[in-house]
Amino acid sequence: MTMYRIFPFLISVVLFSCCSPEKEHWQKLFNHKNLDGWDIKIKDHPLNDNFGNTFRVEDSLLKVSYDQYDSFRNQFGHIFYKIPYSRYKLKVEYRFVGDQAPGGASWAYRNSGIMLHSQSAKSMGLHQDFPISLEFQLLGDDGSGNRPNGNLCTTGTNVEMEGKLITKHCITSSGPTDPGTGWVHVEAVVYGDSLIYHIIEGDTVIHYSHPTIGGGVVSGYDPKVKKDGQSLDHGYIVLQSESHPVEFKTIELLNLENKNP
């Protein structure tokens, strides 16, 4: 039997063995009341200047909103959980709502992301667009009916897949097309600088390994932070603002620090 055929089975064994119900102690990163425990960095604005009240809590949801923007102007925003992690399982429920902000790029329609192994908010440059990180891309249908969800996008990073270095910015997953009209349950399973899995509604849609700093698609960064070739074995969990309103209902983490893949 080839490795290609047995790999899905191995993934199932890994996820079951590390996360059986009797061992799970989930931590709520979002308390449903306020943004305590989170840092905000929006392009062209200082740390924790929540321009336009972009990130807010309403109706027990963490919302990314643009009703106070006259135009988006590439003011990409990110909200960072203040504690870095290395090995963990993350589960998030989100949905796209409303209309895209005026001035948002066409590719950013129903587009957001969860950044893994990110640099800290404090280390972001004032005019930096995206954090150096690994993006679990969240996409909704753009009208084509064929827009896979859960892709990997690398900003200032590279990864390996099947033992080969991947320098392409976005790698398409096997994920389904999200109609963009309801809640979606996604999970990331992260083992430091070893293995990382993107999971949508219980199905693994892409996996990769050995993330390192490198590559492009990030600007305005401090060169002292972008140390190309350095292994990425830990970092911050980040939610993205790319011009389309999105709401988050669940953001919970299971620490796997003493678990092996």
Image: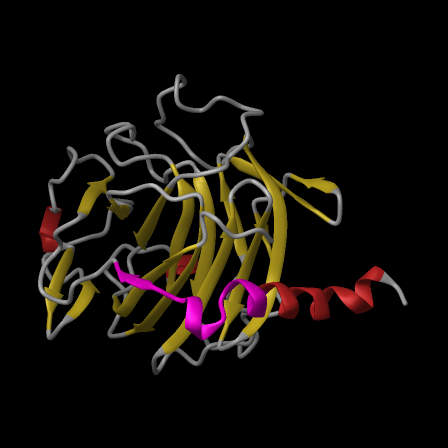
Q: Is residue 19 magenta?
A: yes
Q: Position of residue 209 (x, y in %)?
A: 62, 46
156 with respect to 210 (left or right): left
- Residue at the image point whose x is 10% and y is 52% from the top: 52
- Residue at the image point whose x is 36% and y is 40% from the top: 130
146 with respect to 251 (left or right): right
In this view, the residue farthest toward the front is 22
In this view, the residue farthest toward the top is 224
Q: Position of residue 47 (x, y in %)?
A: 16, 35
Question: Taking 241 as reference, is 148 above or below it?
Answer: below
Seen from the viewer's position, the closer of residues 218 and 78 is: 78
- Residue at the image point whose x is 35% and y is 82% from the top: 181
Is residue 140 at all visible to an observer of this figure? no
In this view, the residue farthest toward the right is 1
Q: Position of residue 146 (x, y in %)?
A: 57, 75
**Which residues are drawn in magenta?**
15-28
| Residue 60 quadrant | bottom left
Seen from the viewer's position, the closer of residues 240 and 253 is: 253
Q: Position of residue 226 (x, y in %)?
A: 44, 24
Is residue 43 at all visible to an observer of this figure? yes
Question: Taking 80 as reference, is 248 above or below it?
Answer: below
Q: Colour scheme in the image?
A: secondary structure
